[in-house]
Image (tube, grey):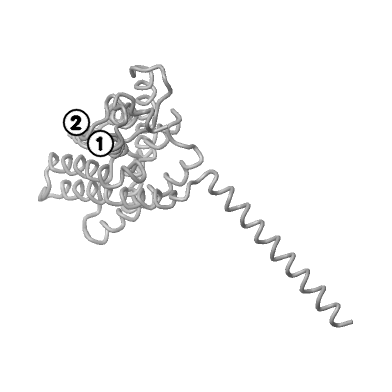
Amino acid sequence: MSKAHSSGGTDELSITMEASENQQLKVSSMFHAYYPPGFIRKVVAEVVATFLLVFVTCGAAALSGTHEHKVSHLGASLAGGLIVTVMIYAVGHISGAHMNPAVTIAFATVRQFPWNQVPFYAGAQLIGSISASFSLKVIFQPIKYLGTTTPSGTDLQALIMEIIVTFTMMFVTSAVATDSKAVGELAGIAVGSSVCITSILAGPVSGGSMNPVRTIGPAIASNVYKSIWVYIVGPITGTLSAVMCYSFIRETNEPVQAISSFKFLRMRSHMHDEHVDVKDPIGYLK
């Protein structure tokens, strides 16, 4: 009798374990259906890239705001543009080097990026920004304002400036990141230069954020939340306007193809090796 009971218990345990394994397989299959195997690497790349972006831009801005002016306004703008360029070449082929939730949302809006991955990218960018901001707080004590962005005039002036400069940056990004006719080896330099130029102009008015997490991270670390809505609404409005504008004027009737300069460079190398027609690079990617 005890043997029969023991056998029955073993069978029930085996069935339970099998059901649990099947459930885990289903969950895993569902996850991989929406998130490719390399998705975690992309998220980590966004954390690292955004950390370095905020660390450099806000660090330079913090030093620029000291009485000694250890870094000039021009130097801070150059640092911001250069770190964007470097990060695009470093992780652009891995995650796309968004480093900006406004950019991620804009790409998703024109179907160049999956909506279900947007929260993960935005979360990664926010983590990178907050981590960099608190790192600066430890390093730069007793500096109080760690590259925080606040309007020098009215909120409306800062909002309009943020919309325009973010539009400029995103318009250039849309050209070099989505249009095969505009893709080239200097894509990263083009985007970084646009950030540098617009930062020089916007710095004295709004701080030239162009990126919600670039403002949110330092705001949390410095406990300064004045007019923070400007730096959320402005960049998102600017990026959405830019991608829609470029999608309208680009020279093609085909849907926008998501292609980065880094993929293009690798593709061109393969085409030379395999004697693929270079007149149809998009067809090669399909």
- The answer, for residue 59, to whether it is visible in the render is yes
User: Horizontally, is 45 left or right of 65 in the view?
Assistant: right
Residue at numbered disc 2: 201
Instruction: Give the vertical position of 30 relative to 191 (above or below).
Output: below
Residue occupying the point 23% across, 35% down: 195
Label 1 or label 2, whichever comes before in sequence order: 2
Q: Looking at the rendering, which quadrant does residue 232 occupy? A: top left
Nearer the observer, 220 or 117 = 117
Identify whether 253 is placed above or below 187.
above
Task: Name the amino acid, label 2.
Answer: Leu
Q: Which mark is residue 182?
A: none
Q: Secondary structure at mark 1?
A: loop
Q: Is residue 204 visible?
A: no
Q: Are marks 1 and 2 in contact (CB under 8 Å)?
A: yes
Residue occupying the point 32% across, 26% down: 179
The residue sitting at the right extreme is: 1
The residue drawn where x is 12% and y is 49% is 67
Q: Residue 175's x, y, as percent?
A: 30, 27
Q: Residue pushed farthest bottom?
A: 2
Query: Can you identify the residue that label 1 sits on?
Result: 208
Residue 12 x %, y %: 78, 68
Quadrant for the N terminus, please.
bottom right
Q: Quadrant of residue 194?
A: top left
Image x and y of residue 205, in percent: 23, 32
- Cα–Cα gap, marks 1 and 2: 8 Å
Q: Position of residue 102 (x, y in %)?
A: 38, 36
Question: Which amino acid does the dot numbered 1 rest on?
Answer: Gly
**Quarter of the C terminus within the rendering:** top left
Number of marks in picture: 2
